[in-house]
Amino acid sequence: MYIRMDVGIQWGERGMRGRMRIAVTVLCVLGSATGLSAQATAGDVLFQSEEPLELTLEADFELLRGDRRGEAPERPAMVRLVDANGVEHEIEAQLRTRGRFRRDAANCTYPPLRLNLKKKQTEGTEFEGQDKLKVVGSCRPNRESYDQLVLLEYLAYRSYERVSTMAFRTRLARITYVDSNGASDPFTRFAFFIEDDDALGDRFGATVFQMEEGKNLPPGFLDAPTAATAAVFAYMIGNTDWSDVAGHNVELLDLAGIALPVPYDFDFSGIVNAPYAIPDPSLGIKDVRERYYRGWCFKMDMTDTVQRFADAEEDILSLWRDLPWLDDGQKNRAVRYLEVFFEEVQSIERAERRFLRDCRAMPG
Protein backbone atom coordinates (compact mmCIF):
# COMPACT_ATOMS: atom_id res chain seq x y z
CA MET A 1 0.00 0.00 0.00
CA TYR A 2 1.16 3.56 -0.65
CA ILE A 3 -0.21 7.08 -0.56
CA ARG A 4 0.52 10.03 -2.76
CA MET A 5 0.83 13.61 -1.61
CA ASP A 6 0.32 16.59 -3.85
CA VAL A 7 4.07 16.96 -4.35
CA GLY A 8 3.95 13.74 -6.32
CA ILE A 9 6.06 11.60 -3.99
CA GLN A 10 5.08 7.95 -3.49
CA TRP A 11 6.25 5.83 -0.59
CA GLY A 12 6.45 2.10 -0.13
CA GLU A 13 6.63 0.65 3.36
CA ARG A 14 10.31 1.60 3.76
CA GLY A 15 9.57 5.17 2.67
CA MET A 16 6.65 5.39 5.06
CA ARG A 17 8.86 4.44 8.00
CA GLY A 18 11.41 7.03 6.94
CA ARG A 19 8.80 9.78 6.66
CA MET A 20 7.28 8.78 9.99
CA ARG A 21 10.68 9.30 11.68
CA ILE A 22 10.76 12.78 10.16
CA ALA A 23 7.20 13.41 11.37
CA VAL A 24 8.17 12.49 14.93
CA THR A 25 11.07 14.96 14.80
CA VAL A 26 8.80 17.75 13.57
CA LEU A 27 6.23 16.96 16.23
CA CYS A 28 8.86 17.49 18.89
CA VAL A 29 9.31 21.01 17.53
CA LEU A 30 5.66 21.85 16.98
CA GLY A 31 4.05 20.14 19.95
CA SER A 32 0.30 19.86 19.32
CA ALA A 33 -0.88 21.06 15.95
CA THR A 34 -4.19 21.80 17.63
CA GLY A 35 -2.56 24.93 19.00
CA LEU A 36 -0.96 26.14 15.78
CA SER A 37 -1.45 29.80 15.01
CA ALA A 38 -3.16 30.75 11.76
CA GLN A 39 -1.81 33.37 9.41
CA ALA A 40 -3.89 36.41 8.49
CA THR A 41 -5.34 36.16 4.99
CA ALA A 42 -7.04 38.48 2.52
CA GLY A 43 -10.29 36.58 3.00
CA ASP A 44 -10.60 37.14 6.74
CA VAL A 45 -13.31 39.81 6.48
CA LEU A 46 -16.07 37.31 5.65
CA PHE A 47 -15.47 35.38 8.85
CA GLN A 48 -15.02 38.31 11.24
CA SER A 49 -18.74 38.74 11.92
CA GLU A 50 -21.26 36.35 13.43
CA GLU A 51 -24.22 38.27 12.02
CA PRO A 52 -26.02 36.51 9.15
CA LEU A 53 -24.89 37.88 5.79
CA GLU A 54 -27.87 38.98 3.69
CA LEU A 55 -27.54 38.35 -0.04
CA THR A 56 -29.32 37.28 -3.20
CA LEU A 57 -28.08 34.37 -5.26
CA GLU A 58 -29.42 34.17 -8.79
CA ALA A 59 -28.81 31.19 -11.08
CA ASP A 60 -30.63 28.59 -13.15
CA PHE A 61 -31.49 26.43 -10.17
CA GLU A 62 -33.70 24.20 -12.28
CA LEU A 63 -30.59 23.30 -14.26
CA LEU A 64 -28.45 22.94 -11.13
CA ARG A 65 -30.95 20.59 -9.54
CA GLY A 66 -30.39 18.29 -12.49
CA ASP A 67 -26.62 18.14 -11.92
CA ARG A 68 -26.70 15.09 -9.69
CA ARG A 69 -24.13 12.70 -11.18
CA GLY A 70 -20.44 12.68 -11.99
CA GLU A 71 -18.30 15.79 -12.23
CA ALA A 72 -20.84 18.61 -12.09
CA PRO A 73 -20.38 21.52 -14.50
CA GLU A 74 -20.18 25.10 -13.28
CA ARG A 75 -23.25 27.22 -14.04
CA PRO A 76 -23.34 31.03 -14.31
CA ALA A 77 -24.59 32.84 -11.22
CA MET A 78 -24.87 36.35 -9.79
CA VAL A 79 -24.39 37.38 -6.17
CA ARG A 80 -26.01 40.62 -5.00
CA LEU A 81 -25.44 42.20 -1.61
CA VAL A 82 -25.39 45.62 0.06
CA ASP A 83 -22.34 46.80 1.99
CA ALA A 84 -22.25 48.69 5.29
CA ASN A 85 -22.50 52.01 3.43
CA GLY A 86 -25.67 51.00 1.61
CA VAL A 87 -23.91 50.42 -1.72
CA GLU A 88 -25.25 47.51 -3.72
CA HIS A 89 -22.70 45.17 -5.27
CA GLU A 90 -23.06 42.58 -8.00
CA ILE A 91 -20.48 39.80 -8.23
CA GLU A 92 -20.34 37.43 -11.15
CA ALA A 93 -19.88 33.86 -10.05
CA GLN A 94 -20.30 30.24 -10.95
CA LEU A 95 -22.12 27.52 -9.06
CA ARG A 96 -21.85 23.78 -9.17
CA THR A 97 -23.39 21.00 -7.11
CA ARG A 98 -21.22 18.97 -4.77
CA GLY A 99 -21.42 16.20 -2.20
CA ARG A 100 -22.75 12.67 -2.36
CA PHE A 101 -25.67 11.87 -0.08
CA ARG A 102 -27.29 15.32 -0.20
CA ARG A 103 -26.63 15.53 -3.92
CA ASP A 104 -28.95 12.56 -4.50
CA ALA A 105 -32.42 13.78 -5.51
CA ALA A 106 -33.99 11.03 -3.39
CA ASN A 107 -32.51 12.65 -0.30
CA CYS A 108 -32.53 16.39 -1.03
CA THR A 109 -34.46 18.58 -3.44
CA TYR A 110 -31.69 21.22 -3.26
CA PRO A 111 -28.12 19.85 -3.26
CA PRO A 112 -25.17 21.54 -1.53
CA LEU A 113 -23.32 24.04 -3.72
CA ARG A 114 -19.84 25.34 -4.40
CA LEU A 115 -19.59 29.04 -5.17
CA ASN A 116 -16.75 30.31 -7.37
CA LEU A 117 -16.53 34.11 -7.22
CA LYS A 118 -14.86 36.52 -9.61
CA LYS A 119 -12.26 37.68 -7.14
CA LYS A 120 -11.70 41.17 -8.58
CA GLN A 121 -15.40 41.98 -8.19
CA THR A 122 -15.38 41.13 -4.48
CA GLU A 123 -13.35 44.21 -3.50
CA GLY A 124 -15.16 46.37 -0.96
CA THR A 125 -17.60 43.59 -0.04
CA GLU A 126 -17.75 40.96 2.70
CA PHE A 127 -16.44 38.50 0.11
CA GLU A 128 -13.23 40.45 -0.47
CA GLY A 129 -10.32 38.07 -0.96
CA GLN A 130 -12.58 35.06 -1.37
CA ASP A 131 -12.42 32.77 -4.37
CA LYS A 132 -14.22 29.47 -3.76
CA LEU A 133 -16.64 28.74 -0.94
CA LYS A 134 -18.84 25.81 -0.02
CA VAL A 135 -22.49 26.68 0.54
CA VAL A 136 -24.61 24.59 2.91
CA GLY A 137 -28.29 25.41 2.51
CA SER A 138 -31.61 23.81 3.23
CA CYS A 139 -31.89 20.30 1.86
CA ARG A 140 -35.66 20.73 1.44
CA PRO A 141 -36.40 24.47 1.47
CA ASN A 142 -40.15 23.91 1.37
CA ARG A 143 -39.97 22.51 4.91
CA GLU A 144 -39.27 24.88 7.79
CA SER A 145 -37.80 22.07 9.90
CA TYR A 146 -34.93 21.70 7.43
CA ASP A 147 -34.01 25.35 7.98
CA GLN A 148 -33.38 24.40 11.60
CA LEU A 149 -31.05 21.60 10.50
CA VAL A 150 -28.87 24.19 8.74
CA LEU A 151 -28.55 26.16 11.98
CA LEU A 152 -27.73 23.02 13.98
CA GLU A 153 -24.96 22.00 11.59
CA TYR A 154 -23.60 25.56 11.54
CA LEU A 155 -23.36 25.50 15.35
CA ALA A 156 -21.48 22.19 15.19
CA TYR A 157 -18.81 23.86 13.05
CA ARG A 158 -18.66 26.82 15.42
CA SER A 159 -18.32 24.47 18.39
CA TYR A 160 -15.25 22.82 16.92
CA GLU A 161 -13.58 26.23 16.68
CA ARG A 162 -13.85 26.40 20.47
CA VAL A 163 -11.55 23.41 20.97
CA SER A 164 -9.20 23.53 17.96
CA THR A 165 -7.58 26.18 15.80
CA MET A 166 -7.46 23.58 13.01
CA ALA A 167 -11.07 24.17 12.06
CA PHE A 168 -12.96 25.34 9.00
CA ARG A 169 -14.28 28.88 9.38
CA THR A 170 -17.94 29.51 8.64
CA ARG A 171 -20.32 32.43 8.16
CA LEU A 172 -24.06 32.26 8.62
CA ALA A 173 -26.16 33.77 5.85
CA ARG A 174 -29.72 34.54 4.81
CA ILE A 175 -29.83 33.81 1.10
CA THR A 176 -32.63 34.76 -1.25
CA TYR A 177 -32.57 32.25 -4.09
CA VAL A 178 -33.76 33.57 -7.45
CA ASP A 179 -34.26 31.07 -10.25
CA SER A 180 -33.17 32.89 -13.42
CA ASN A 181 -35.38 30.79 -15.67
CA GLY A 182 -38.49 31.53 -13.60
CA ALA A 183 -39.23 27.87 -12.92
CA SER A 184 -39.77 28.59 -9.21
CA ASP A 185 -40.60 31.59 -7.05
CA PRO A 186 -37.83 33.29 -5.05
CA PHE A 187 -37.44 32.14 -1.45
CA THR A 188 -35.19 33.08 1.47
CA ARG A 189 -33.56 30.53 3.76
CA PHE A 190 -30.69 30.19 6.19
CA ALA A 191 -27.41 28.88 4.82
CA PHE A 192 -23.75 29.10 5.75
CA PHE A 193 -20.48 29.45 3.90
CA ILE A 194 -17.48 27.22 4.62
CA GLU A 195 -13.99 28.32 3.72
CA ASP A 196 -12.28 26.46 0.91
CA ASP A 197 -9.93 23.61 1.87
CA ASP A 198 -6.98 25.26 0.08
CA ALA A 199 -7.69 28.49 1.97
CA LEU A 200 -7.67 26.53 5.23
CA GLY A 201 -4.30 25.03 4.33
CA ASP A 202 -2.89 28.42 3.36
CA ARG A 203 -3.75 29.81 6.80
CA PHE A 204 -1.48 27.24 8.43
CA GLY A 205 1.19 27.00 5.75
CA ALA A 206 0.01 23.49 4.87
CA THR A 207 -1.13 21.75 1.70
CA VAL A 208 -4.01 19.36 1.09
CA PHE A 209 -3.26 15.64 0.93
CA GLN A 210 -4.21 14.17 -2.42
CA MET A 211 -5.59 10.79 -1.35
CA GLU A 212 -5.41 8.02 -3.92
CA GLU A 213 -8.79 6.38 -4.57
CA GLY A 214 -9.24 3.32 -2.38
CA LYS A 215 -6.07 3.94 -0.34
CA ASN A 216 -6.01 4.83 3.33
CA LEU A 217 -3.44 6.93 5.14
CA PRO A 218 -1.62 4.95 7.87
CA PRO A 219 -2.81 6.41 11.19
CA GLY A 220 0.82 6.78 12.27
CA PHE A 221 1.01 9.77 9.90
CA LEU A 222 -1.68 11.63 11.84
CA ASP A 223 -0.77 14.30 14.34
CA ALA A 224 -1.98 12.49 17.45
CA PRO A 225 -3.23 15.50 19.50
CA THR A 226 -5.13 16.96 16.53
CA ALA A 227 -6.64 13.58 15.60
CA ALA A 228 -7.63 12.90 19.22
CA THR A 229 -9.30 16.31 19.47
CA ALA A 230 -11.27 15.63 16.29
CA ALA A 231 -12.30 12.20 17.57
CA VAL A 232 -13.47 13.48 20.96
CA PHE A 233 -15.40 16.24 19.20
CA ALA A 234 -17.08 13.65 16.96
CA TYR A 235 -18.04 11.75 20.11
CA MET A 236 -19.36 14.95 21.69
CA ILE A 237 -21.75 15.70 18.81
CA GLY A 238 -22.57 12.03 18.18
CA ASN A 239 -20.89 11.84 14.77
CA THR A 240 -19.73 8.46 13.43
CA ASP A 241 -19.87 9.33 9.71
CA TRP A 242 -16.16 10.05 9.27
CA SER A 243 -12.76 8.47 8.73
CA ASP A 244 -9.53 10.39 9.16
CA VAL A 245 -7.39 7.77 7.41
CA ALA A 246 -9.75 7.55 4.42
CA GLY A 247 -10.38 11.29 4.25
CA HIS A 248 -14.13 10.74 4.60
CA ASN A 249 -15.72 13.94 5.91
CA VAL A 250 -12.24 14.86 7.14
CA GLU A 251 -9.86 17.14 5.26
CA LEU A 252 -6.26 16.05 5.64
CA LEU A 253 -3.62 18.76 5.58
CA ASP A 254 0.08 18.04 5.14
CA LEU A 255 2.38 20.07 7.36
CA ALA A 256 6.00 18.93 7.03
CA GLY A 257 4.95 15.30 6.61
CA ILE A 258 2.39 15.33 9.41
CA ALA A 259 -1.28 14.77 8.53
CA LEU A 260 -3.61 17.22 10.26
CA PRO A 261 -7.23 16.02 10.22
CA VAL A 262 -9.92 18.73 10.02
CA PRO A 263 -13.51 17.43 10.30
CA TYR A 264 -16.50 18.69 8.31
CA ASP A 265 -20.00 17.66 7.21
CA PHE A 266 -21.95 17.02 10.42
CA ASP A 267 -25.49 16.44 9.15
CA PHE A 268 -25.36 12.74 10.16
CA SER A 269 -24.44 13.61 13.75
CA GLY A 270 -26.72 13.01 16.69
CA ILE A 271 -26.82 16.68 17.64
CA VAL A 272 -28.24 17.60 14.22
CA ASN A 273 -30.37 14.44 14.09
CA ALA A 274 -31.49 14.88 10.49
CA PRO A 275 -34.50 12.71 9.57
CA TYR A 276 -32.46 10.90 6.94
CA ALA A 277 -29.47 10.16 9.20
CA ILE A 278 -28.80 6.53 10.12
CA PRO A 279 -25.65 4.99 11.64
CA ASP A 280 -23.42 2.51 9.86
CA PRO A 281 -24.85 -0.94 10.78
CA SER A 282 -21.32 -2.29 11.31
CA LEU A 283 -20.93 -0.07 14.39
CA GLY A 284 -23.68 -1.87 16.28
CA ILE A 285 -25.57 1.28 17.25
CA LYS A 286 -29.21 1.81 16.36
CA ASP A 287 -29.54 5.60 16.42
CA VAL A 288 -27.25 8.47 15.49
CA ARG A 289 -27.83 10.01 18.91
CA GLU A 290 -26.03 7.07 20.50
CA ARG A 291 -22.45 8.15 21.08
CA TYR A 292 -19.65 5.90 19.84
CA TYR A 293 -15.94 6.72 20.12
CA ARG A 294 -13.91 6.02 16.96
CA GLY A 295 -10.55 7.58 17.80
CA TRP A 296 -7.23 5.76 17.48
CA CYS A 297 -5.19 4.35 20.36
CA PHE A 298 -2.32 6.78 20.12
CA LYS A 299 0.51 6.44 22.60
CA MET A 300 -0.27 9.72 24.27
CA ASP A 301 -1.69 11.15 27.45
CA MET A 302 -5.22 12.39 26.66
CA THR A 303 -5.48 14.56 29.76
CA ASP A 304 -4.85 17.81 27.87
CA THR A 305 -7.35 16.85 25.16
CA VAL A 306 -10.14 16.06 27.61
CA GLN A 307 -9.30 19.13 29.70
CA ARG A 308 -9.65 21.35 26.64
CA PHE A 309 -13.25 20.19 26.19
CA ALA A 310 -14.07 20.52 29.87
CA ASP A 311 -12.70 24.09 29.87
CA ALA A 312 -14.79 24.97 26.79
CA GLU A 313 -18.09 23.80 28.28
CA GLU A 314 -19.70 27.16 28.95
CA ASP A 315 -18.34 28.69 25.76
CA ILE A 316 -19.83 25.88 23.67
CA LEU A 317 -23.15 25.75 25.51
CA SER A 318 -23.51 29.53 25.11
CA LEU A 319 -23.26 29.14 21.33
CA TRP A 320 -26.28 26.86 21.33
CA ARG A 321 -28.29 28.77 23.93
CA ASP A 322 -27.77 32.19 22.36
CA LEU A 323 -28.49 31.67 18.65
CA PRO A 324 -31.83 33.53 18.34
CA TRP A 325 -33.02 31.77 15.16
CA LEU A 326 -32.86 28.27 16.62
CA ASP A 327 -36.30 27.35 17.95
CA ASP A 328 -36.66 26.51 21.65
CA GLY A 329 -37.38 22.83 21.10
CA GLN A 330 -34.22 22.26 19.03
CA LYS A 331 -32.19 24.45 21.36
CA ASN A 332 -33.22 22.60 24.53
CA ARG A 333 -32.68 19.20 22.90
CA ALA A 334 -29.20 20.13 21.66
CA VAL A 335 -28.11 21.72 24.94
CA ARG A 336 -29.22 18.70 26.95
CA TYR A 337 -27.41 16.39 24.53
CA LEU A 338 -24.20 18.38 25.06
CA GLU A 339 -24.70 18.55 28.84
CA VAL A 340 -24.66 14.74 28.97
CA PHE A 341 -21.25 14.80 27.29
CA PHE A 342 -19.89 17.45 29.63
CA GLU A 343 -21.12 15.46 32.61
CA GLU A 344 -18.99 12.59 31.29
CA VAL A 345 -15.84 14.70 31.10
CA GLN A 346 -16.23 16.34 34.51
CA SER A 347 -13.85 13.68 35.78
CA ILE A 348 -10.87 14.07 33.46
CA GLU A 349 -9.30 10.78 34.61
CA ARG A 350 -12.48 8.75 34.14
CA ALA A 351 -13.14 10.25 30.71
CA GLU A 352 -9.55 9.58 29.65
CA ARG A 353 -9.86 5.94 30.71
CA ARG A 354 -13.10 5.70 28.72
CA PHE A 355 -11.53 6.97 25.51
CA LEU A 356 -8.42 4.82 25.94
CA ARG A 357 -10.62 1.79 26.56
CA ASP A 358 -12.83 2.33 23.51
CA CYS A 359 -10.22 3.55 21.02
CA ARG A 360 -9.31 1.65 17.85
CA ALA A 361 -6.09 -0.35 17.92
CA MET A 362 -3.30 0.99 15.71
CA PRO A 363 -2.54 -1.41 12.84
CA GLY A 364 0.60 -3.53 12.84
Image (tube, grey):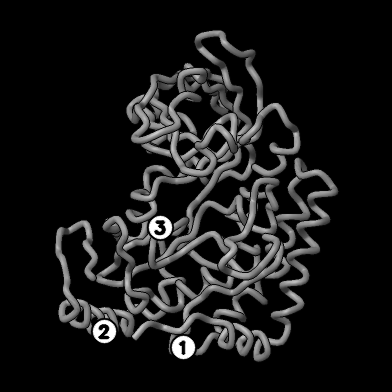
| Residue beneath the point at 60% across and 50% down | 267
Q: Nearer the viewer, mark 2 or mark 3?
A: 3
**Cα gap from disc 2 to disc 3, whole angstroms:** 23 Å
- Amino acid type, mark 2: Thr
Q: Position of residue 154 (x, y in %)?
A: 61, 48
Asked where in the image residue 151 lies, by quadrant, the reply is top right
Dot 1 lies on which element? loop
Q: Which residue is mark 3?
A: 251
Q: Earlier in the sequence, mark 1 or mark 3?
A: 3
Q: Earlier in the sequence, mark 2 or mark 3?
A: 2
- Amino acid type, mark 3: Glu
- Amino acid type, mark 1: Met
Count of marks, rendered view:
3
| Residue beneath the point at 77% across and 69% down | 339
Position of 109 with respect to 218 (left or right) is right
CB within 8 Å, label 1 to label 3: no
CB within 8 Å, label 2 to label 1: no
